[in-house]
Structures are given as structure tokens and as C-alpha cells.
């Protein structure tokens, strides 16, 4: 083998070994650099840039469900933090806004809820009565209306199924001519879609069972209150409960005793029974039949006795 060939092979092997060493060193350095960058990236992900703090404000919320007329005490309220932009304008920020330092239940009276309040609902001033609990009913009357009460019983009060918040019609029963020999009562619907404010002295809409009441308080106009007072002194008032959501007035007309009697008698099957059908049996045929026999120009009458003649009883059962 020539010397030049050996030298070339030796140089090639040396360059190959050198390339392998350099490649391993470059790969090791790249891997180490990659591992150095991963913890820093993880640290950046673990500690993201801090967002600017959202301004918060304190508000008073209900700590339990409250219904109209419930007493409000500090234990049924609590203070929470809410973003400033989401709090109602009239929201109370501290319990001292309701219970002042000089507040005393025995001296000033209890705080009363003027509307149903759900748990975690923000407490607004118009939902809490003033000191002494005054205005609990008057706060529910709409501007321009009045509260008037009428007497009811188990029948005129719809068996106790009327609750505060329902809409009712007022039915007036009277005797226009009490001096007449024959009574002629009259029924009129004098008011429609009247809102019930209270039943007896209860104003809670959440009652579960019907309650037979003696009085019902209604929200009416000033003139309607006068009409109710006159109607109670002259006749009898009765409530007619409306369906939920049916607030539009309907067309009505008076009904008196004579019209009621005419209505009861018209088209009544009990007043107009069917007339019985009288069945008259046919008379039994004679036992002998006359037969005419014609022979040429001669005509002769012959009497023949009937056979299989049915009895009178069989004819009656057969309907004649």
C-alpha cells in the first residue's frame, strides 16, 4: 500500500472523530440552554403580570329570605364586598345605616320589611320601614289610591283563598225596592280588577293554607272608597277572585231575581219532562173472515174460520 493512501485514510479518520466530538459538544450545549430557558418560562407562567385592582365597595345584603312584614334584625343582614360599578345607587353600605347607635327596639319599634327580600339580595332603603315600623301598609299603596276595608265571611271572601296581591271584582247584592210585596234582589259588579292589600291584619302573600277572614283591605280610588262605604250600608258585598294575569275589565250587566228565575226555567230538562207515549193496542181481527169466490160470472161469499189467531195479550205485548 502506498504511503499517500495511508496518510489520506488517517486524515479522514481524524477529521471524522473531530466532527463527532464537535457535534456532541454542540448538542449538549443546545440541550443545556433549552433546560435553562424552561424554568424561566414556567416562572413567567406561574407569576403572570398583575392586573390592576378592581375598586370594591361594601353593601348590606340579606342573610336569609324575608317576606313582607318580617322584622329585620342585625342577625338577618350582613355586609359583603362588591365591585363598585355593580352596586345599586341607593345600596346601604353598613348596618349602622339601618340600626343607628341610639336605636332601641323597645323605644323606637322594630324595622319591618316592606317587600319580599331574597337571600343575598341587596337591601335598599325603600324596602325597610322607618323607625317605629310606621308606613308598612301605606308604603304599598300606589300614588293616587287609598286603602279601604270591607266585611267578608267564608262565602263572600271566596272561602279564604284570597291573599294579598290578588285581583278581585266587587259584587254588590241589594234590594232596590224593599217596600215591594215580592222581593226582587239585584246583583251588580261595581268594581273590577281591585288589588288586595291585606286580609284581616296579615299582609303576607306567602301564606300556605286558606284563611277564613272577616275583613279584606283593598286598594281603590277615593271615589271607589266612597262607593264601597255606601254599598256596605245598603246591601251586601262579595268578592269574585280573578285568574292570575287577568287584569283587563270585562263587560257586565245587572241580574235581578226575576231574570234569575227566567234563566233557571229556560231550557231546563227538570222543568220540561218528556210527555209519556200512550200505546193503544189494535183490536183483534174477527175469528171468521169473509172471502169472495168468483166463478165465471157468478160471485159467491164464503165464511172461513181463521187459524193461528193471536190472543189479545199477545197483541198488547207486540204494541198492536
Image (cartoon, rainbow, N blue to C red):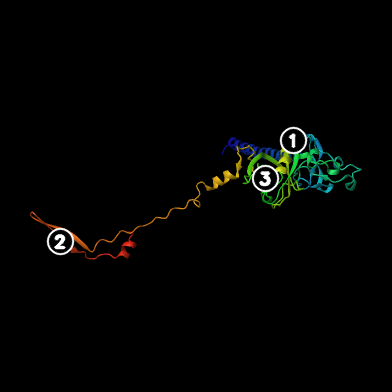
Query: Which residue corresponds to mark 2?
Result: 302
Task: Report crowding for label 2: few under 14, some 14 to 19, many 20 or more residues within 10 A (C-alpha).
Answer: few
Mark sitting earlier along the chain (1/2): 1
Describe residue 164's horizontal placement relative to residue 79 as left or right: left
Nearest to the observer: residue 195 or residue 129: 195
Query: Which residue corresponds to mark 1?
Result: 222
Mark sitting earlier along the chain (3/1): 1
Query: Can you tell which mark lies on residue 286?
Result: none
SS assignment at label 1:
helix
Residue 54 screen position, x and y as percent? 79, 35
Mark-to-mark CA distance, 1 and 2:
105 Å
Nearest to the observer: residue 195 or residue 221: 221
Question: Residue at (79%, 39%) from the top-left corner?
Answer: 138
Query: Compared with residue 214, is residue 286 higher up or lower down, i.e. above or below?
Result: below
Query: Which residue corresponds to mark 3?
Result: 239
Quadrant showing the C terminus: bottom left
Question: Residue at (71%, 43%) from the top-left corner?
Answer: 234
- Number of marks in the image? 3
Amino acid at each position: 500500500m502506498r504511503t499517500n493512501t495511508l496518510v489520506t485514510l488517517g486524515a479522514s479518520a481524524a477529521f471524522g472523530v473531530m466532527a463527532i466530538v464537535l457535534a456532541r459538544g454542540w448538542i449538549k450545549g443546545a440541550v443545556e440552554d433549552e433546560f435553562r430557558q424552561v424554568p424561566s418560562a414556567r416562572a413567567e407562567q406561574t407569576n403572570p403580570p398583575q392586573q390592576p385592582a378592581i375598586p370594591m365597595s361594601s353593601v348590606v345584603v340579606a342573610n336569609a329570605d324575608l317576606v313582607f312584614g318580617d322584622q329585620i334584625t342585625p342577625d338577618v343582614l350582613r355586609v359583603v364586598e362588591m365591585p363598585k360599578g355593580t352596586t345599586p345607587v341607593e345600596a346601604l353600605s353598613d348596618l349602622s345605616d339601618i340600626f343607628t347607635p341610639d336605636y332601641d327596639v323597645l323605644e323606637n319599634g322594630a324595622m319591618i320589611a316592606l317587600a319580599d327580600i331574597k337571600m343575598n339580595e341587596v337591601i335598599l332603603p325603600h324596602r325597610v320601614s322607618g323607625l317605629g315600623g310606621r308606613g308598612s301598609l301605606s308604603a304599598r299603596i300606589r300614588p293616587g289610591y287609598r286603602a279601604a276595608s270591607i266585611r267578608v265571611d267564608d262565602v263572600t271572601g271566596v272561602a279564604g283563598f284570597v291573599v294579598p296581591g290578588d285581583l278581585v271584582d266587587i259584587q254588590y247584592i241589594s234590594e232596590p225596592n224593599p217596600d215591594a210585596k215580592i222581593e226582587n234582589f239585584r246583583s251588580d259588579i261595581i268594581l273590577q280588577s281591585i288589588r288586595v292589600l291585606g286580609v284581616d291584619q296579615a299582609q303576607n302573600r306567602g301564606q300556605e293554607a286558606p284563611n277564613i277572614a272577616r275583613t279584606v283591605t283593598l286598594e281603590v280610588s277615593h271615589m271607589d272608597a266612597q262607593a264601597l262605604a255606601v254599598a256596605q250600608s245598603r246591601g251586601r258585598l262579595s268578592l269574585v277572585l280573578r285568574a292570575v294575569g287577568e287584569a283587563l275589565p270585562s263587560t257586565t250587566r245587572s241580574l235581578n231575581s226575576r231574570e234569575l228565575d227566567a234563566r233557571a226555567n229556560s231550557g231546563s230538562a227538570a222543568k220540561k219532562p218528556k210527555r209519556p207515549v200512550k200505546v193503544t193496542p189494535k183490536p183483534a181481527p174477527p175469528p171468521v173472515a169473509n172471502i169472495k169466490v168468483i166463478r165465471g160470472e157468478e160471485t159467491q161469499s164464503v165464511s172461513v174460520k181463521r187459524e193461528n189467531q193471536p190472543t189479545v195479550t199477545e197483541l198488547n205485548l207486540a204494541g198492536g
